[in-house]
Image: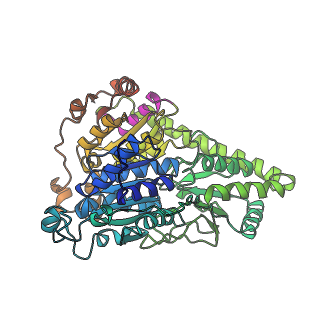
Amino acid sequence: MTQAQAKDGGDAIMEAFRNLGVDYIISSPGSEWAPVWEALARQKVNETGGPTYINCWHETLAVDLALGYTRVTGKLQAVLLHAGVGLLQGGVGIHSAYLGEVPMLVCSGEAISYGENPELDPQGQWYRNLSVVGGPNRFVEPFVKWSGQATSPYTLYEQLVRAGEMAQRVPKGPTYLDIPIETMIHGWTPPAKIRPVPQAPRTQPETDAIDRLADRLARSSKPLIITEGSGQEVAGFASLVQLAELMAIPVIESASIYANFPKSHPLYLGGNGEAFFNQADLVLLLGSRSPWYPPHAGPAHATIVAMGENPLKGQMAYQNLLADQYVEGDLTLTLQLLTEALEANGAAGGSNAAKIAERREYWTAEHNRLEEGRLAAVAAARARQPIDPVWLCAALSEAMPDDAVFVEEVTSHRGQVMRHVQWDNPQSYFHPNGGLGQGLGLALGVKLAMPDRPVVALMGDGGFLYNPVTQSFGVAGEANLPFLTVVFNNGNYEAMRRNHQHYYPDGDAARSDIWHGVHIPGPDYAKLVEPFGGYGVRVEDPAALVPALQTALAAVNEGRIALVDVVLSI
């Protein structure tokens, strides 16, 4: 009989991940993680339950894949990065998780004996290249909720559990633990009793705050909802629909990062709400970090109520919500409690019934007017050559099924996407927080969480080139996560040109058409999927756009990645 192998820090890490409910260990592998790889092998040999390993080819990709999965499921995942430099590579994704309040447990390693311990050779890279003066924590401290070092093998398990628990408490966000190889390779004795890790509670607003808001809504003549993140959960999406319908409140999505409300709904007013601000006497901000810009330019005559579990964002250098009341608590639960309070006090009936019916008729007419304008813009764009981005967005709506999920990183054309790409279902749209270069990883994470739904990554050609492209396509094949990429290809960093012209509208660059940092001599994007067995096509004819998208979707449904490179007019 084979003698049982002694447990070490790798087993402590795996046990912590199991008890935190981690589904996946997502990693761009580094040389310090041998104890974890050994523990993973032992898990498989012994047929023990536990997290599945996903091999990523780039650190930013690993973080964004975990981020996408958690944004769909709400469940904390573990990311293992290589040394200090790997932590730097993953920094853009960690920063995104921090801005978006997405719980995540990030770990990286180091060696602290540098080869001077006669009983352990960590190998020379730690001495020569990979050490960080003051510790790798310094790299991420400004944009994680908490960071620390595993100080000994005797505290490793509890430190990991504690970091995971903290990540899931309000305000949620990424936590970081530096784990030296000396700690991981050391023997580990499990605690006499390993307790189940309790789930993070849902925070609930005070009853008085709900009652006061329900009273305000009952007395309001023209309430308005502005939302950014109420649709993160399926139940949150449904709860907003229920509240809006009960009281006939129109909904505006401002700087939205989720699909929050059905676009075909007669109370939906799109993403550009400034024209309606000064009609409102009461504005509900649902999970909104920055509902208007400039920050002082909100509704002039309305009472403003900010709702969510953490409306005041400490991760933002400046924020001005103009709030008169805060109703703080889990947003899905808060919407449900508010609707229940309104139903209990009969706010939608009695003397209010006629007022609500009139309001519903008014906003339905406004929605229809906006929809007529949208359809007219599509009709005018349909046959233009080169392809108009409005027609590309409309063609996506025509070609993709109702359950399609759009992950968007287009920058210059985001306004067209929000207006002309249609969706009515929850969890149908995701937008990255923070810097460019995260869309493909986010799409992979969303696909991992929703394998039965088609995932479409909408990428500007500039943003696409910020991404780890070959790594993303490789991981899609290795992890069986086929998805469709659509490149909005205008050959420019158009945002750069617009920014330049904003400051120098009549400058020498504008007069001479000499631009720096604008033009992109990009590759043949459609061919980038070929090494991975994917389907790629370049489209320049507007009439060919819908068939090309349908063919690409068919390839994805067969289990292949696909890319449609669409050459745009602007």
Q: Can you tell which quarter of the image residue 154 is in?
A: bottom left
Residue 189 picture location, percent across and down: 42, 62
Residue 322 picture location, percent across and down: 56, 72
At a point 16% along the width and 44% down the height, the residue shown is 521
Q: Is residue 327 left or right of residue 385?
A: right
Reply above or below: 117 against 9: below
Position of the C terminus, as image quadrant, is: top left
Residue 334 in sight from this viewpoint:
yes
Q: Would residue 298 be counted in the magenta stretch?
A: no
Residue 410 in sight from this viewpoint:
no
Q: Give the camera-side residue of 184 and 498.
A: 184
Q: Is residue 556 left or right of residue 28?
A: right
Position of the N terminus, as image quadrant, is: top left
Number of numbered tags placed on the structure image: 0
Q: Give the camera-side residue of 182 and 324.
A: 182
At a point 52% along the width and 43% down the height, the residue shown is 427
Reply above or below: 145 against 15: below
Question: Mainly helix, strand or loop, the magenta region?
Answer: helix
Residue 399 picture location, percent across and down: 44, 28
- Colouring chosen for the image of the structure: rainbow
Residue 195 picture location, percent across and down: 56, 60
Q: Is residue 411 left or right of residue 197?
A: left
Reply above or below: 549 against 157: above
Which region is colored magenta? 387-401
Q: Give the camera-side residue of 379 and 525.
A: 525
At a point 43% along the width and 39% down the height, the residue shown is 447
Considering every residue shown, the one lying at the far front of the view is 1
Q: Is residue 206 left or right of residue 99?
A: right
